Image: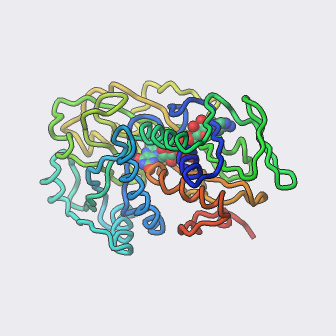
Amino acid sequence: MGASACASIAQRGVKVLGIEQYTIPHDMGSSGYQSRIFRIAYYEHADYVPLLKEAHTGWLELNQVADQTVFHETGGLYMGPQGGDFVEHSQSSAKAHDLEFERMDAQTIRNRFPVFNIPDSFAGIFEQPAGIVFPERAIEAQARIARKHGAELLEDTRVNSWKEEDGCITVESSGGTFTCDRLVICSGAWTQKLCPDLPLSVSRQVIGWMQTSDPELITWPNLVTWAIELPDQSLLYGFPLMDQLDGPAGFKMARHLPGETSDPDTMDRTPREDEESSFLEYAKQHLPSIIGEITDLKICLYTNTPDKHFIIDHHPEHDHVFIAAGFSGHGFKFQPIVGRILADLAIDGCTGHPIEFLSMDRFKTG
Ligand SMILES: Cc1cc2nc3c(=O)[nH]c(=O)nc-3n(C[C@H](O)[C@H](O)[C@H](O)COP(=O)(O)OP(=O)(O)OC[C@H]3O[C@@H](n4cnc5c(N)ncnc54)[C@H](O)[C@@H]3O)c2cc1C
């Protein structure tokens, strides 16, 4: 989100300094490891759909200017029990915003995508514009755009603190002290270290890559980007095999469910021996024919809000400080539009994009 904000602010001709504690990109935060799902028929909340339509345009535009493909349309299939939140809310979001989609019964899904073992009580929503975003490439592309338009981006520089006095914001970092008129904080899992009062919690997430004896069945376009709602309402999800992916080889899958609460600075980043059980048990049930050896496990971070919706707003006590955080494991797909919104907020003080539902007011009590 920081790279996208720097690009959007610089493109509007405003002087911007971006500060990153690691390299750009890196795998210590929320955005590492190869791929992220892009979907539009959003079961989480229909109000995200207008933002997703704009994000979709943003990804297609970024594809035009980036050195490498940052977004690949594969189609997306969202499966689960009929009457369950994932299928029914994906459908109601699609209907509310006139999105094209196809509802499939279990037999149709099994015929079209024979890798899936799902009961007759399941259904699925298919949408064609869904696909895969390549996060490292997207971050590199945004950073390049930012620098091309005059932004200065510091790497290996950690912000230790910030304060606002009489309208002047001072940022103290390992690379020196800086002053500015506006501050945009998009520090992912480290946000509470800079804004302690925000209702955020960080969780440790496991991702796996599996080898399989039947790759044909799961290679795009025989398979699309997919997710299945599990009995506890978490999602088992994954990506089709494709050529030219960066990072670990194999069939990538994971479970969308906040893991153990963690601190990003002290967390153990080495996967434990049995950690694949979080998704493997369900993969054996729903994709039994392709189960093979897990050859890679990686650890990534979610930053969760209490309701799992994002925070994009000004700071509760500082009108010139803006925060984009709490992306709760589903934010990357919004990266191009979040940058534009943050540019609007930082430069104009307001945005025409519909983000009221992401304001911090919703956490006020009494
Ligand atoms: C396993 C996994 C799967 C996911 N799958 C999907 C998916 O399929 N689709 C989707 O849309 N989203 C997905 N997400 C979520 C998505 O990746 C995140 O929502 C998104 O990356 C959040 O972006 P961010 O900028 O808030 O955080 P980050 O990408 O972590 O960026 C925050 C940056 O701030 C830097 N920083 C923090 N503190 C400081 C400091 N004090 N000084 C300097 N720099 C600092 C960090 O080093 C980091 O680079 C997934 C996340 C995970 C972990």
Image colouring:
rainbow
**Image spot of residue 74 (x, y percent):** 26, 50
Q: Nearer the viewer, residue 166 or 264?
A: 166
Residue visible at 28% across and 35% down in the picture: 251
Answer left or right for 113 relative to 24.
Answer: left
Whether residue 70 is visible: yes
Residue 279 image-quadrant placement: top left
In the rendered image, the residue lying farthest to the left is 111
In the rendered image, the residue lying farthest to the right is 166
Above or below: residue 332 compared with residue 241: below
Residue visible at 62% across and 38% down in the picture: 152
Whether residue 203 is visible: no
Answer left or right for 224 relative to 140.
Answer: left
Answer left or right for 227 relative to 322.
Answer: left
Q: Quadrant of the C terminus?
A: bottom right
**Image spot of residue 54 (x, y percent):** 43, 62
**Image spot of residue 238 (x, y percent):** 32, 43
**Image spot of residue 107 (x, y percent):** 15, 59
Residue visible at 62% across and 43% down in the picture: 187
Above or below: residue 352 compared with residue 21: below
